Image (cartoon, rainbow, N blue to C red):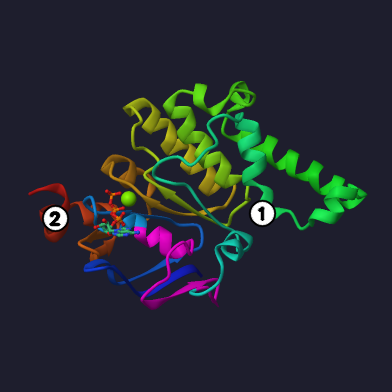
Amino acid sequence: MSVFQAKDLSVSFGGIHAVREVSFTVESGEVFSIIGPNGAGKTTIFNLISRLYDVDSGTLIYNDEDITRVSPHHIAELGIARTFQNTELFEQETLLKNLLIGRHIHSRTNIVSEFLFLPSVRKQELAFRQAVEDVIDLLDLQSYRDQHISNLPFGIRKMAEIARALCLQPKLLLLDEPSSGLNPEETEDLSFWIEDINEELGVTIIMVEHDMNLVSRSSNRVLAMADGKTLAIDKPAVIQNHADVRRAYLGD
Ligand SMILES: Nc1ncnc2c1ncn2[C@@H]1O[C@H](COP(=O)(O)OP(=O)(O)OP(=O)(O)O)[C@@H](O)[C@H]1O
Ligand SMILES: [Mg+2]
């Protein structure tokens, strides 16, 4: 069963065709990676899915629902969460606070009931906190929970960014270059976290990545792009040996 479908997505900025007629389908439970040289249009695809950008043409389908024009808020409510290539965390807040803020969209309460602090709100707040603690436990972030983001090592900030997205309890998680800036050991750890998130939590993942080892290790299928266009969609081993991909991306 497919969870997500992109059909003929296109978007331009001025004269730049950032994404041109890109189509792909992501199956339930898959780790689907998007690779391509700098400027290929990978992040733009995430910005289209998370509805930060409008498509010029094409359709986005999530669980049979057309989400091409829904609000970013609704995207989160539907269970689609993302990380950002450059972590988007509140530097002067603790990790815990960042996660609690990130989870706020799951709140069904309004300002008035929050002000009155109704029992239902309290119950919801306790459930939020539990979910956040579960994510902290899952990603082994206990020792950092009360530290300010600005004091955390880079590798932990990257995990904090993933944690923030996971607190939304997504069904579909978009990871934009989760390994960038990580050393080989941290990247290997990341591959295990990705496996846990995918298999233990049952989250379908779309991952933009440059590290081909991580891509090969973690992904079921790969979309290779260049200049906004699809080069190939296939299993990692096939992609790595694909003539067009090697030319465009691997520099052969
Ligand atoms: N908001 C925008 N305004 C103008 N141009 C944009 C905008 N967003 C993306 N682009 C352009 O679209 C193209 C694709 O950018 P995108 O960020 O999707 O690339 P990418 O594949 O994620 O690259 P990288 O690997 O460097 O992150 C680039 O030429 C970029 O400059
Ligand atoms: Mg990018």
Q: Identify residue for label 1.
A: 105
Q: Which image quadrant for residue 171?
A: bottom right
Q: Identify residue for label 2.
A: 248
Left or right, 93 with respect to 216, comes to right
**Compared to 130, does 65 lie above or below?**
below
Amino acid type at image mark 2: Ala
Q: Which image quadrant for residue 111?
A: bottom right
From where the camera sits, is residue 137 visible?
A: no
Q: Count neighbours of disc 1 (C-alpha within 10 A) and say few if under 14, some if 14 to 19, many if 20 or more.
A: some
Left or right, 200 with respect to 207, comes to right
**Compared to 233, does 241 lie above or below?**
above
Amino acid type at image mark 1: Ile
Along the viewing direction, whichever of 205 and 72 lies nearer the viewer: 72
Residue at image x 43%, y 28%?
A: 155
**Compared to 248, does 163 lie above or below?**
above
Q: Which image quadrant for residue 36?
A: bottom left
Q: Secondary structure at mark 2?
A: helix
Residue at image x 50%, y 26%?
A: 150
Q: Alpha-carbon distance for marks 1 and 2?
A: 40 Å
Q: Is residue 41 magenta?
A: no
Q: Give the magenta-colored segment's residue range.
A: 44-67
Q: Secondary structure at mark 1?
A: helix
Along the viewing direction, whichever of 155 and 94 lies nearer the viewer: 94
From where the camera sits, is residue 10 visible?
A: yes
Residue at image x 63%, y 25%?
A: 142
Q: Tell me where residue 68 appears, x and y as whole percent.
A: 48, 74
